[in-house]
Image (spheres, rainbow, N blue to C red):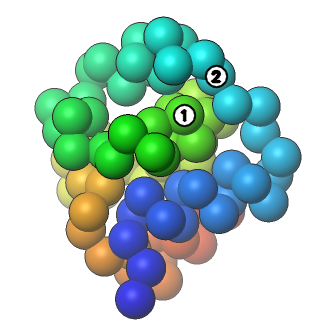
Amino acid sequence: TLTRTEAMIMLASAARLPLPSDAEAAQILTGYSDAANVPAWARRAVAASVKAGLLAQFPNANSIMPNNQASRGEVAAMV
């Protein structure tokens, strides 16, 4: 199984997205109700994915759901 955080990290890496600074990552993630649940070690890659529009925001546009299991459909939408 794969979490949404892990999927976003892999996609950010595969796309060679530039990682934001810690401060910029915090700013990018501020609008999400569960941003505090993103593990510290993953925040920059998750923020890069969000900034690039890779985040599949289903069913709630204001949450990342970082610890939820990523479905095939969600990963396909991120790609």
Within 10 angstroms of label 1, few (less than 14), some, or many (20 or more) residues?
Answer: many
In the rendered image, the vertical position of residue 67 relative to residue 1, given as above or below: above
Please, which residue is most extreme toward the left here?
33
Q: Distance from label 2 to label 1 (Cα)?
A: 6 Å
Within 10 angstroms of label 2, few (less than 14), some, or many (20 or more) residues?
Answer: some
Q: Is residue 15 left or right of residue 8?
A: right
Q: Is label 2 in contact with label 1 (beta carbons under 8 Å)? A: yes
Rendering coords of residue 62 (x, y %): 23, 35
Rendering coords of residue 15 (x, y %): 81, 52
Q: Is residue 26 left or right of residue 72?
A: left
Rendering coords of residue 6 (x, y %): 49, 65
Sequence-first tag of 2 and 1: 2
Residue under label 1: 44
Quarter residue 34 falls in: top left
Q: Kindly identify the amino acid type of the residue bearing the numbered disc 1.
A: Arg
Residue under label 2: 20
Rendering coords of residue 35 (x, y %): 26, 34
Please, which residue is most extreme toward the bottom here?
1
